[in-house]
Amino acid sequence: MAVSLKKKSSSEKLITPETQNKIPFSIIEAYKNIRTNLISVLSKTDSKVLAISSPNASEGKSTTSVNIAITMSQLNKKILILDADSRRPTIHKKIKVDNSKGCMNILAGEASLDEAIQHYNAFLDVLPAGTKVKNPSELFSSEKFDNMLEELKDRYDYIILDTPPVNPVSDALVIAQKCEAMVLVIRASVTTYDSFERAYESLKVLDVNLD
């Protein structure tokens, strides 16, 4: 699924109880429509794991990831948002949680899931990226990452992975193959057709579900 955002608008704000009255109704409804479509796509294959990316950096994927996670948790579904963008992690800044332990620390054998997962609200948990590593692609390719996802599936109704952008690095392509579907975020007047087509074709070659 491709999601288009307006350029530098209130779509960059998080839809929280504190900010909801300050965000245009159309933005809130747009995220609810995305939520409905995603749940429909995932339910058809009894899937739980969704990756969110963009062709390049600064196109709104992380804000989109958080807002989708928040709106899905409003259905009283148990949601985990996982920051898999270890090169430029931002989820901990947006949700304001500690980043000293996270996904990369778990994959490096330095922390457990229970030590790294933090609570945002009654239905939404956060797994930040954690300490930066030199070889994120290799860690995401590992059996340890597969095992971690399987354990998380037992704990949550849906798992949302905020991945690095597709074009600059290979991490998103590695992660996407381990997820049941992907949302590709594009920003009007920022994302070029050529960069979108390049990212789209890279994902389709790997048979990633973008429907």
Image: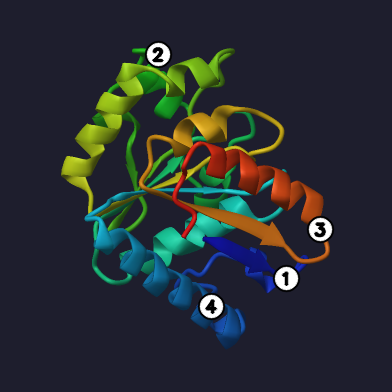
Q: Amino acid at mark 4?
A: Ala
Find disc 1 in the rendering and name its residue.
Answer: 6
- For label 4, the residue is 30
Helix, strand or loop for disc 2: loop
SS class, disc 4: helix
Q: Which residue is pictured at 48% across the width and 27% down the height?
A: 130
Q: In screen coordinates, is 20 left or right of 181?
A: right
The Cα–Cα distance between marks 2 and 4, rounded to whole angstroms, is: 38 Å
The answer for how far apart the CA atoms under marks 1 and 2 are is: 38 Å
Residue 97: % across, % down: 46, 43
Residue 149 got which mark? none
List the residue tagged with mark 2.
108
Q: What kind of element bears circle 1? A: loop
> At which x and y percent is residue 99?
49, 33
Q: Depth check: give the residue in front, 83 or 168.
A: 168
Q: Is tag 3's residue or tag 2's residue first in the polypeptide sequence? A: 2
Instruction: Please report whichever mark, 2 or 4, sits nearer to the chain's N-terminal start.
Output: 4
Labels 1 and 3: the sequence-earlier one = 1
Q: Residues within 10 Å of mark 4 (few under 14, many from 20)?
A: some
Q: Residue at x 66, y 56 (%)?
A: 60
Residue 190 numbered mark, or none: 3
Circles 3 and 2, Cβ within 8 Å, touching? The answer is: no
Q: Quadrant of residue 151?
A: top left
Mark 3, secondary structure of its residue: loop
